Image (cartoon, rainbow, N blue to C red):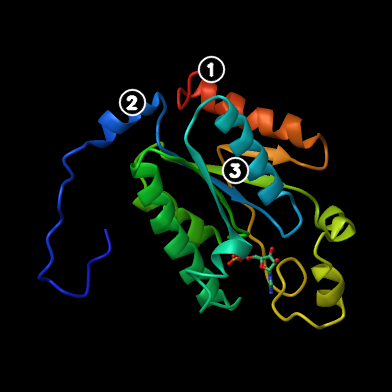
């Protein structure tokens, strides 16, 4: 665990345990970490999974890159250092929400393997589920939902992931979802089925 700057701090254990929360919820608290290129379908998939979980009565929440950069991380840009800090903060928030019993769906490019691995390390064993939203750059660029690839190619956006900044694909993600090869529903079902198979949720 990272050491705080002050040594005059003490960790407080909460009265209501995580186990008690999970028992009441009827499912585990986990972090579904969606990672992939811009336009790969992270937000769409995270929202679709959340809707399926919500309909089944589970507690789920989406943390989305663009949204979080409007508030908590509005001081950060897209340099490697800022992306690392972006993911560090999100990792801590996701971990807090998971320990509050939520199924947290995070949708961040999170292009650096080391940054994602650091989040895995601060999570409990089995709590961090890495989902590679696997889509060829050519397809993402074709989709270009926000028109950003076009601008990046024109040199109007520096350090754009996939064009002028790297994306390091996960080496061994828990799930590899190919969004160019199935519908949103089919892709979301793969995630929900994984949660059932691994005992995170029980079908209702
Ligand atoms: S991350 O790399 O730090 O994980 P994050 O997911 O928070 O990125 O934000 C990515 C979103 O910011 C993209 O979906 C896109 O809308 C926007 N964006 C703006 N500039 C860039 C850039 N240089 N590279 C990638 N995405 C960018």
Indicate the secondary structure of the residue bearing disc 3.
strand
| Residue toward you, 81 or 203 | 203
Check residue 24 in the rendering and tell me which mark sits there, or answer none. Answer: 2
Element under disc 1: loop
Tell me the residue that label 3 is attached to: 131
Q: Which image quadrant: the N terminus? A: bottom left
Answer with left or right where residue 8 lies relative to residue 113: left
Residue shown at the point (59%, 38%) measured from the top left = 50
Q: Residue furthest top?
A: 204
Q: Report if the CB atoms under discs 1 and 3 are less than 8 Å apart.
A: no
Tell me the mark number nearer the camera, choosing from 1 and 2. Answer: 2
Give the mark toward the camera: 3 or 2: 2
Task: Give how far across and how far down residue 60 sits, in percent.
Answer: 50, 39
Q: Does label 1 or label 2 sit earlier along the sequence? A: 2
Nearest-to-viewer mark from 1 and 3: 1
Along the horizontal axis of the image, is 125 left or right of 78? left
Image coords of residue 170 (percent x, y): 60, 50
Which residue is depicted at the point 72% across and 60% down?
A: 38
Q: Is mark 2 within 8 Å of ligand 1?
A: no
Do we see residue 111 in this rendering? no
Residue at the spot 81% in from the left edge and 34% down from the top edge: 182
x and y percentages locating residue 191 in the rendered image: 62, 32
* Separation of marks 1 and 2 at Cα, in angstroms: 15 Å
The crowding category of the residue bearing disc 1, from other C-alpha atoms within 10 Å (few below 14, some 14 to 19, many at least 20), is some
Pick whichever of labels 3 and 2 is earlier in the sequence. Answer: 2
């Amino acid at each position: 665990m990272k050491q705080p700057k002050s040594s005059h701090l003490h960790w407080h254990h909460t009265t209501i345990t995580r186990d008690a929360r999970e028992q009441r919820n009827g499912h585990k608290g986990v972090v579904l970490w969606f990672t992939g290129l811009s336009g790969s379908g992270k937000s769409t998939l995270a929202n679709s999974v959340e809707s399926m979980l919500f309909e089944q009565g589970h507690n789920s929440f989406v943390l989305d890159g663009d949204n979080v950069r409007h508030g908590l991380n509005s001081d950060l840009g897209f340099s490697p250092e800022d992306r690392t800090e972006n993911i560090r903060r999100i990792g801590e928030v996701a971990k807090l929400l998971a320990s509050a019993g939520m199924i947290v769906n995070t949708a961040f490019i999170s292009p650096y393997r080391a940054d994602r691995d650091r989040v895995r390390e601060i999570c409990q064993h089995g709590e961090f589920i890495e989902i590679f939203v696997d889509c060829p750059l050519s397809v993402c660029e074709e989709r270009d939902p926000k028109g950003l690839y076009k601008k990046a190619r024109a040199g109007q956006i520096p350090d754009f992931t996939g064009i002028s900044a790297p994306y390091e694909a996960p080496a061994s993600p828990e799930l590899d979802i190919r969004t160019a090869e199935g519908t949103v529903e089919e892709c979301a079902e793969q995630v929900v089925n994984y949660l059932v198979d691994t005992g995170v949720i029980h079908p209702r």
